Image (tube, rainbow, N blue to C red):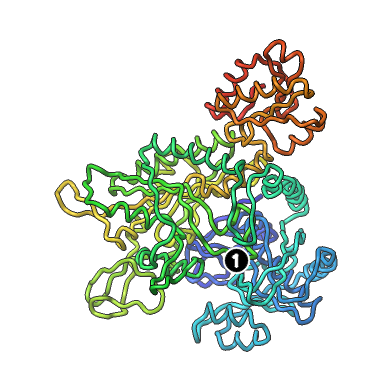
Amino acid sequence: MNSNITARIEKGQRYSDIISDRAKHLIIAAKQNGVLHDLDDTASESGEVELINIYSDDGLKILRHSTAHLLANAIVDLYPGAKPNTSNEDSDVFYYDFDMPPISVDDFPKIEEKMREIASKNLKIEKIRQDKNAMLEIFKDNPYKIDKINENLKDGEISNIYRQGNYIEFCRGPHVPSTGYIKAFKLLSVASTNYEGDINKQKMVRIYGTSFPDQKMLKDFLQRREEAMKRDHRKIGQEMDLFLFDERAPGFPFYTPNGAIIRNELINYMRELNEKNGWEDVWTPHAYRDIIWKESGHYDKYKNDMFLFKLSNGDDYGLKPMNCPGHIAIYQRSVHSYREMPIKYSEAGTVYRYEKSGEMGGLTRPRAFTIDDGHGFLRPDQIFDEVSSLIKIIPDVFRTIMGESEISYDLSTIDKSNPQNYLLSYICRDCGEKFEMRAASGVLKCPKCGSTNLEVDFSMWDNATDNLRSALEDLNLKYKENPGDAAFYGPKIDIHVKDALGRFWQLSTIQLDFFMPINFDLTYVDSDGKKSRPVILHRAIYGSYERFIAILLEHFNGKMPTWLSPVQTYVVPVSENYNDYASYVHSELVKNHIRSKLDLSGNTISKKIKLIRPMRVSYIIVVGEKEKISNTVSVRNRKDKTRSYNLQDFISEINMEIKNRSIDQLF
């Protein structure tokens, strides 16, 4: 049902012309040479084309984008003077920002009814090509669209607007063919934000929603979402006292002692893995002079998302958005021989990115986060083995931490039709000069002769991509290839893990980089005694600790495996008469490196346990007369199963559970 169809198309033929009548209700777009097209587009060349099923990943994204436009259509109809800003689709949810009077969820039924009314008319969604000047005239009453047009189009450049009935939108597309394809949608929440995330700019209303091809999928999603809301990591984090956010440092997480335990346990596990696999621990600064970001290429790409500041002496600095330049600086400290390779550095490195105020969300999207970062400096002949080694390690890591989980793999490659998005090599057609590490922004000229007659050289990208693809295929792993999703400096493998709520999370990434070694003039001495260029392998397994902790909290509903649990045992006497024995048990547990707490309050045993529950402790230990006489403990696990243990036997068994990083409890 969700499979795309591959077909043949001839140059000049419309994509809609090659769809069978039987499939017309399912096919909403086409993809040729990695580029998505509306069905009314005509093919610029003959060849194979992928017809996009509305149930496929691309199809769902297009459907949600079209539903966001349907929402905007309804808003401008219902609220005269409302000005749409921009939409975004993130996983199962879309949102649209509007300059309009504040609304609440109580207004959603009225808006949804208007959306259904427009959808039922089955209005054709028509793409119209216009030049920049015409677009500026069309959207002259909407300053936000004017900004988008000026940001995205050069003078005289032509782009798309989309029309459905009385509603017109500046958009690159593609879209479903008509509003009748939009059948099952729901508005979810409303929030306040600011234009471009700047608190000094216009307040905006952000409306979130979702859309699916049918009502059953929508119903299933809403049920999963309801369960996910119960497991929201922010709610669990508060109940377990793990972390907090403070308006005096918006977007920057503060870890409490309990939260720091989870974070440190994950860091320690990663350090063990790194040590076993030849990755050496390093530490790098948090702030650098901006020259390093200009040298690396990050400045042009990330400067609007960086925390930049000027010192009193006039020097410009920036908090690091990436750890790689710091690891490169360590590599540069000495001359390296081919015999030393690979050289692999790892760091729990904190980076800083200016997320807009409306886009921050607890630990999943903070402004400061720590990456289990690693950078390998490799000989080209070592790429395949190192990538393969990582791909073998990663599933074991997630099975250890999360239990048996479904894992999927994406290979993200360059979009050769948009070279301006990447760092590339160029060859001058006039003088033959080859120059590298230039992003195609503005007018590029040959540094030798000044010619603009340049050819892009994709050979390094192709080599890197071939190595990643071969590593996946050698291990017989199924993967999806995503043209255009590569990092700006190289192709990558992204690894997704499915959680207990059926959601896939992109966690691990493996990226090859042939360009930063050129930018920083990195070398090693090869077997012939000549200087050769290393390849950089960027890798993170958890991704960021913050996001991974949020995922784990929701996956386990806060009931973390005992080795990760902030409180592994909580000792409770049945009455004050047994406080001494409870204190003894607690001290023995602590002496044996078990994270334990003790409740000697005057509350009843039932109230003590009720107060302990939200903390999701691994084991509640209840002691009374029987336990004191026999030197035993009554242990209750999270499933409310109870078992009596000799104290030392329990200590031995829980320590074994912790040492083995077991997913399952003792009984």
Residue 191: image quadrant is bottom right
Dot 1: element: loop
Work out which quarter of the rendered image holds the C terminus and state it.
top right
595 w.r.t. 326: above or below: above
Which residue corresponds to the image point at 49% horizontal and 36% vertical from the top-left?
269
Q: Is residue 120 visible?
A: no
Q: Residue at x 63, y 65 (%)?
A: 357
| Other residues around mark 1 within 10 Å, as few (<14) / some (14–19) / many (≥20) | some
Q: Position of residue 583 (x, y in %)?
A: 67, 24
Q: Is residue 465 left or right of residue 50?
A: left
Residue 40, given in percent of the width and then of the height, sits at 61, 71
Q: Which residue is mark 1?
A: 356
Q: Quadrant of residue 179?
A: bottom right
Q: Is residue 393 left or right of residue 164?
A: left
Toward the viewer: 635 or 465? 635
From the top left corner, tell me how far across and down residue 171 is, in percent. 61, 74
Identity of the residue furthest to the top in this view: 630
Say if 57 sits above or below 548 in the image.
below
Whether residue 260 appears in this view of the structure is: yes
Q: Which image quarter: residue 601? A: top right
Q: Looking at the image, which is closer to me, 508 or 326?
A: 326
What residue lies at 35% left-to-right and 62% top-to-bottom?
458
Q: Residue at x 67, y 13 (%)?
A: 631
Q: Residue 598: x and y, percent?
A: 69, 30
